[in-house]
Image (spheres, helix red, strand yellow):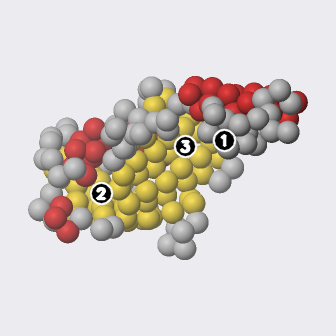
Amino acid sequence: MMRSISGSGLPHPLPIGSITGRWMCWLLLSLLWIAGCAQPPQQNVAEEPTWSGRIALQVDDKSSQSFSAMFELRGSAQSGGLVLLSPLGNRLAQLDWQNGHAQLQSGQDMRNSDSLDSLLQEVTGTRIPVDALFSWLQGTQVSATGWQADLSGIASGRIIARRDDPAPRATLRIALTR
């Protein structure tokens, strides 16, 4: 015979004294305790800035180096990542940096450096003004030794930066995807 709940006249579905009733109470209390301890998912207050599009760099020296690729860039000059992609979307290279360390992976080749600036100079043959580049991408005109940036096309996602001195001459073109 089932007992009624608090004199309501309704039968209690699982008598508390039974093993099944104790098990259900323990399970319910455990779930409530676990739910009370759970942390809500953390919301990113400020997401990392990201850009994508096409990038081209021409360095006018004896070997006249140049490259062009699609890119995905995230972060800042202090911490971030750059992925270079072929026109078909294949990953050509990935560059990650933070806390004064930079790492470049291209196929099976891996290069490490204590400085993003030195790694970029080693790979491209010229010094790239990383701090200024992030400002230019945000539409802010800042100076970088030897470089002149043309931000007149930033509204349509175009940036052109040139360096004439010191040698070698270099031209950096960026076309952002909207």
User: Under tag 3, what secondary structure?
Assistant: strand
Mark 3 and mark 1 in contact? Answer it, CB < 8 Å. no
Task: Check disc 1 and give the amino acid type.
Answer: Gly
Q: Earlier in the sequence, mark 3 or mark 1?
A: 1
In the rendering, at what x and y percent does residue 146 appear? 19, 42
Residue that appears at 20% across and 40% down: 144
Question: Gap between marks 1 and 2, in whole Å?
Answer: 83 Å
Viewed as shown, does residue 16 lie left or right of 18? left
Question: Gap between marks 3 and 1, in whole Å?
Answer: 74 Å
Q: Which residue is mark 3?
A: 104
Placement of the C terminus among the 4 image quadrants = bottom left
Q: Which residue is mark 1?
A: 9
Q: Label for residue 172?
A: 2
Q: Earlier in the sequence, mark 1 or mark 2?
A: 1
Question: Can you tell which quarter of the image residue 58 is in?
Answer: bottom left
Task: Check disc 3 and give the amino acid type.
Answer: Leu
Residue that appears at 24% across and 65% down: 157
Question: Can you tell which quarter of the image residue 56 is in?
Answer: bottom left
Residue that appears at 35% across and 56% down: 51
In the rendering, at what x and y percent does residue 105 appear? 59, 46
Viewed as shown, does residue 73 lie left or right of 157? right
